[in-house]
């Protein structure tokens, strides 16, 4: 009886050991058939964005209420077209007043000049009338400049990228109102590792894939940034797209592939 009790623990230990070895073997077999992690196919691939060569955000040069805004985001316009018009009733009234003051000051100066020739007034009076005429003309110039800012005209052909305001809205001086882009010429911007600089050079060709179109395109490296970001150890570069593919739109993104020269 004692012999059986001694043998039983040994059998149990052997059983549990065999079971653990079986589980370990099964786990190893399952790990060996796990799918491989997909690695990048190219070591010299970087993300890019399609951007317009020319774009700008136009801010209000004067404060006022927006009286005219007929464009919408995406609309096209030509150079010289009115994009936004402000209500300048008060400014135009001040301009008319400035013109009247110039006329008044001019007539006063001309009369004083004639009287001065007749020695009927002092030199001080003619000098004061001349100064008042100059001040009136300066005020007229200021009001003409202000009124010229009542309409925002397009500086180039393009499209409305983004509207920051609405009609009848009051805008302050310097407030952004509209972003416009010239989409007749596009380029691609990339942030590349600074360690590429030894072989990156202006004029080198590279291919890039745009995700929105699913198409490969060709571009030429046009500009290399002047400063490296010390944190990310990267630098900005810009490429010019060959031709002007009509399907490309500013804001599209994709991947560029660079091949170092041997």
Image (cartoon, rainbow, N blue to C red):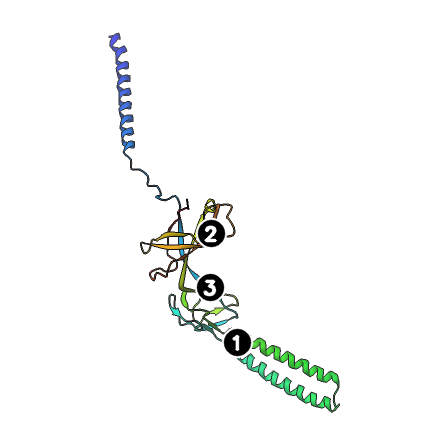
Q: Earlier in the sequence, mark 3 or mark 1?
A: 3
Residue at x 50% of width, y 76% of height: 88
- Tag 3: Cα neighbours inside 10 Å, few (<14), some, or many (≥20)? few
Badge 3 element: strand
Q: Which mark is residue 81?
A: none
In the displayed structure, would residue 125 be above or below residue 259? below
Residue at x 59% of width, y 84% of height: 100
Residue found at the far bottom of this picture: 118
- Mark 1 vs mark 2, CA separation in Å: 41 Å
Q: Is residue 135 left or right of residue 9?
A: right
- Percent x, y for residue 221? 43, 54
Q: Quadrant of residue 121?
A: bottom right
Q: Is residue 134 left or right of residue 197?
A: right
Residue beneath disc 1? 147
Q: Which mark is residue 56?
A: 3
- Mark 3 vs mark 1, CA separation in Å: 22 Å
**Front residue (pair 63, 73):** 73
Q: Earlier in the sequence, mark 3 or mark 2?
A: 3
Residue beneath disc 2? 236
Residue at x 73% of width, y 90% of height: 117
**Residue 162 showing in the rendered view:** no
- Tag 1: Cα neighbours inside 10 Å, few (<14), some, or many (≥20)? many
**Front residue (pair 143, 172):** 143
Number of the front mark, 3 or 2: 2
- Mark 3 vs mark 2, CA separation in Å: 20 Å
Badge 2 element: strand
Number of the front mark, 3 or 1: 3
């Amino acid at each position: 009886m004692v012999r059986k009790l001694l043998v039983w623990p040994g059998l149990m230990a052997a059983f549990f050991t065999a079971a653990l070895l079986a589980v370990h073997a099964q786990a190893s077999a399952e790990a060996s058939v796990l799918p491989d992690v997909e690695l990048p196919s190219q070591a010299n691939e970087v993300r890019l964005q399609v951007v317009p060569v020319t774009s700008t955000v136009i801010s209000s040069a004067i404060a006022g209420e927006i009286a005219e805004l007929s464009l919408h985001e995406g609309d096209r316009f030509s150079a010289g077209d009115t994009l936004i018009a402000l209500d300048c009733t008060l400014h135009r009234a001040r301009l008319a007043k400035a013109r009247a003051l110039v006329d008044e000051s001019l007539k006063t100066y001309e009369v004083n000049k004639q009287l001065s020739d007749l020695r009927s007034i002092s030199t001080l009076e003619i000098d004061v009338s001349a100064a008042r005429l100059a001040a009136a003309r300066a005020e007229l110039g200021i009001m003409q400049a202000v009124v010229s800012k009542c309409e925002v005209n397009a500086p180039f052909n393009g499209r409305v990228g983004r509207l920051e305001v609405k009609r009848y809205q009051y805008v302050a001086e310097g407030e952004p109102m509209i972003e416009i882009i010239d989409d007749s010429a596009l380029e691609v911007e990339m942030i590349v590792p600074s360690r590429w600089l030894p072989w990156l050079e202006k004029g080198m060709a590279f291919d890039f894939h745009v995700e929105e179109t699913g198409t490969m395109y060709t571009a030429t490296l046009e500009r290399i940034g002047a400063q490296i970001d010390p944190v990310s150890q990267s630098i900005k570069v810009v490429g010019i797209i060959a031709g002007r593919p009509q399907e490309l739109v500013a804001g599209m993104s994709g991947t560029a592939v660079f091949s170092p020269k041997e």
